[in-house]
Image: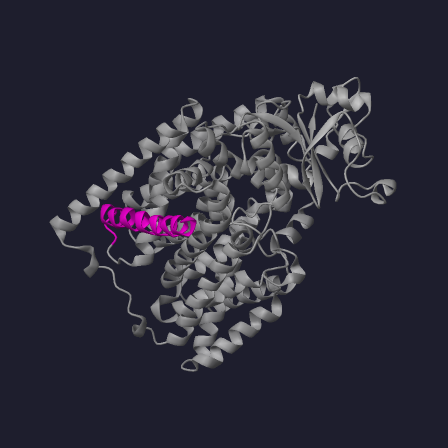
Amino acid sequence: MENVKYIFIVFFMFIISFIEGDNVLALFSVKKKSLTKAITYGFVFLLAIFELISVPFVYSNSSFLNLVITYSIFLIVSLLIFIFRQFKYGFFIKDYHFNFFKYKNRVTMLVAILLIIFTAITSSYLEHTDADDGYFITISTIAYQTNKITYDEPTVYDGAMSKKVDTFRPQIATWELFVAYISKIGAVHPAIVAHSILPFVLIIFCFMAVWNFGIQLVGNTLAPLFILLYALLVLFDGSNTASQGAFMLLRIWQGKAMLANFIIPMLMSSILSMYSEKVKWKQAIWNLILVIAGINLSVVGIYLMSIVYFVTGMPYLVLQAKRKNWKNVLGITIKVFSTMLPVIIVALFLYMKLTSSSSGQTYVSTPPKSWLSVLYNGYGAVPFFIVFILCFVHIYLHEKDIVKKCFFIGVPITLFVSFLNPVLNKIVAQHITGVDVYWRLYWILPIYLIIAYAVSNLLDEYYSGKETLSLIISASIIMSAGTYFYTPSTGHFKAHSNAYKINVNALAAADKISKDTNGESTIAIFPERLSYLIRQYDSKIDVVRSRFFSEDSRIIRNNRTYRWLYNQIYMKNNINSDEVISLLKTLNVRYIYISQNELQNSSYALKKGPIKTKLYKIIHTRKSGYLYKVL
């Protein structure tokens, strides 16, 4: 039965995206329709509308159920419009067809399709744990289990009963609620949806977006080779966990990963089409919809999408200015500025709100990392970056299409002259991106696109008609320059033990606590490697600190800090002293999980079984640890 639900969610996401996409393509008068274009355009529109509908619910503290009902009404209306259009204007099937045999490079196309499916299935099947899920998936779980909407960081991470800290995170990115909506429709836990279902769907969506972009860049004939090269680049960028490819394979269910791999390429593609076409208001409005969808995926989208717009569009404006096409420059500027004005206003409002908070003031005054260290973090594998530089130089010297040259050469130069300029590093890091995530600007650098474009054209030029040889050469170049992502030596993935992809000890302990409390809210202490997992699974269990417990220097009482308490419990095995018991009562802790992984006392290691105590009751025993209830 559970497998049926999983399959339903997969089909549901593809079908609603296609239906919405068919409506959108008609609305924006897109002439060249395709299945991949309909699905990707539709998914963008679904995200943008969800963002506009959900933000008022977030700020009004409304019930998540009301949001589900409202968005479902929108989907039903979209379905009715779709059905009406089919009967009035003719069924869509004649506009959408995929003829595999029309491609000359059929072997390349088949290998590319199989490689993409392999990537989607493997990332869905294998397990990768990321501590950020303690925030992102927990938001979805809270909405799914309690019908409450909250983005308050301490509440999400630790729970309503835990001690608060001063923090500010703009509550405008509602992707997590979209994940909760999918979970609600399919009646599947958000952790399963995010970790085991979405990777398959979303990775395919990302490659569909790149496929559309590839056709725009190299045409239908070379598109199979282009997408194959792109897929190989993603698969063999295993040494760089900050790259676009890493975020696609490791945590595509997080909105920021979709921002990097889905929305940014789509926005770049849309802006590139403005280079060669007479810019219409519809194009500018569609770009705004893409920006709104990017904001839905991640709060960093509000500045990252604007920067993408700037660095992708500016080279063309400079070219037009050089040609003295001032009317065209003015027309584009008016359309872009007018449609982006709401985003600019919201961005300025959030910036003022951030800098007026104590945590925000600290954040914007934090010294940034050195520009060179961020550069290394941004490009990752040295061989990949060398290949990128060689391809960049080749395009500069040999590309004859001025529009494509303007894009491939102009975007990197504009990016490094402006936002990635070492002279402006401090200003940009502190006041635009944030010092911790300045490196995400490298997602805008079209490394994969430039390599795939240059290599596919070179192979076509020198080995045209020799498809097998082209495949071998392209694969050899990338495989020799990179590191295979799924190899065990990278440590990125491991075999999954359950569909939640949450540590089995955390699941078992949470189930026992829930049974002991009859599903009522309570608070517990877990070791750090498990703590951030608990609320992803059961949002009614609060934890003292979901992350950085052992580093927290905040005082609980009498100069005793969270760090001191953590060390007493997990480094010294001290849960019986009066001082520890008193602090636990101050924090309203009812349960403690002691894992043998964290018990480092040599004397305890010689014993078999739990710590002897009369102050606690053991309610759960596993080979790897013990769950105590405070009496």
Quarter of the image for the C terminus: give it: top right
**Placement of 235 over or under 142, stated as above or below:** below
The answer to whether one can see residue 13 in this image is: yes
Q: Position of residue 302 (x, y in %)?
A: 47, 37
**Placement of 397 over or under 68, stated as above or below:** below
Task: Please give left or right for residue 353 compared with residue 40 in the image.
Answer: right
Q: Position of residue 498 (x, y in %)?
A: 55, 50
Q: Position of residue 295 (x, y in %)?
A: 44, 38
Q: Residue visible at 39% across and 33% down?
A: 341
280 or 602, nearer to the observer:
602
92 or 427, nearer to the observer:
92
Residue 13 among those drawn in magenta: yes
Q: Position of residue 426 (x, y in %)?
A: 64, 38
Q: Residue visible at 76% across and 41% down?
A: 598
Q: Main secondary structure of the magenta part?
A: helix
Looking at the rendering, the stretch of residues picked out in magenta corresponds to 1-30
